[in-house]
Amino acid sequence: MIEPRQWKALWLFSRTGKLTNTAREMYLFQPALSAMMRKMEEETGVSLFIRTGHNRISLSPAGRVAAEFAGQLPDLQQTALDAIRQTSRSLGICAPGIRFYLEKPGQLKTEENLQGWDTEMLEDDRDLEAGLDSGRWQAVILHLPPEAGYLVQPLFTETLFLAVPNQHPLAQKDSIRLADLAGQNLLLHTGIGFWNGFVRSRLADAHFASIDDFAAFQSATLVGAFPYFTTNVVPWTIPDNVCILPIDDPQVQATYYLVCQKKDAALFHHLCQVLYHQTGTSAVYPAAERKSS
């Protein structure tokens, strides 16, 4: 199969007419370029070049036809890429709770939902914005409002809570502050998007038992040895040997924003119509609840 690099060399040669100039444009030595040309002829099964004495070479009639197509390939590639991106349905997100929110029964206004969309999670909002600009995603959901230049709609608010084993000293509190967790041993699931960096940056003195696998993390929470973080959108059932404590710091609430480029206004308004807009989702855990062991 003829490689894109070979097509490019053929097209450049049709423009320059000289191997030396083409090799310079391709950052190749001339013998390597000559070998590339011969391989291209082997791939097509026809003579693309006319070789004469004194190391002179020119395009054959077949070579001129091939070079004409080679010149069209960049535009065709971009057309194909645009068409692929238009049919692709991908969403960049900054935290896993967004998936729970989108998949929540009754969360979608109509039968038309986001189940056909691929979601990809990154921790940094800036990386998500860059992916939106490059066309990697058609929309992103951020935990901070972006700078001007985008279409933005608030969606819902997620609140961080601490799940504490009933026998743990912290279980005697009605609520806690992040400062109360200094020096504590905590379970931490690493796949929590931006919350991972948030927790680590604000609890530099805590000791984390980090677990990558979600199933293994769930199993570890059942043991009830260490506190761990949960939120008001996490769908799992809290074990009976654990109580949920509100965290008093205001930073533990994150409002999520649907963001699209302005040129994608039709898509943005469609997504706004499909999703319920909740800027203040009520907490599943409104107050600390101690359960008997």
Image: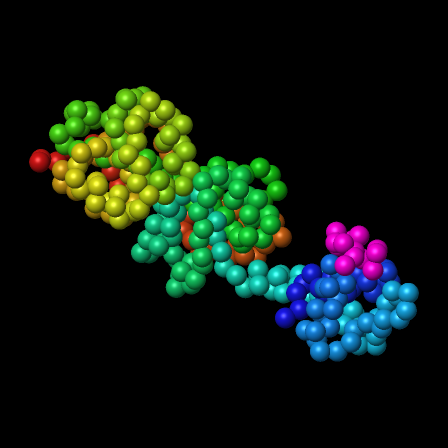
Q: Which residue is drawn at 88% across and 66% down?
A: 56
> Which percent across, then down, holds residue 41?
73, 73
Residue situated furthest left in the rendering: 293
Q: Quadrant of residue 38?
A: bottom right
Taking the image as drawn, is residue 183 in sight? yes
Q: Residue at x 12, y 36 (%)?
A: 291
> Which percent across, then down, holds residue 283?
29, 39
> Which percent across, then down, holds residue 285?
24, 38
Q: In the image, 112: left or right of 52?
A: left
Residue 22 lies in the magenta stretch: yes
What range of the chain is rendered magenta? Answer: 19-31
Total labels drawn = 0
Q: What kind of secondary structure does the magenta stretch mostly adopt? A: helix
The quadrant of the rendering that contains the C terminus is top left
> Which percent across, then down, holds residue 37?
75, 66
Q: In which quarter of the image is residue 253?
A: top left
Q: Which residue is drawn at 35% across and 40% down?
A: 190
Q: Quadrant of residue 110?
A: bottom left
Taking the image as drawn, is residue 72 in sight? no
The quadrant of the rendering that contains the N terminus is bottom right
Depicted 65 relative to depicted 26: above or below: below
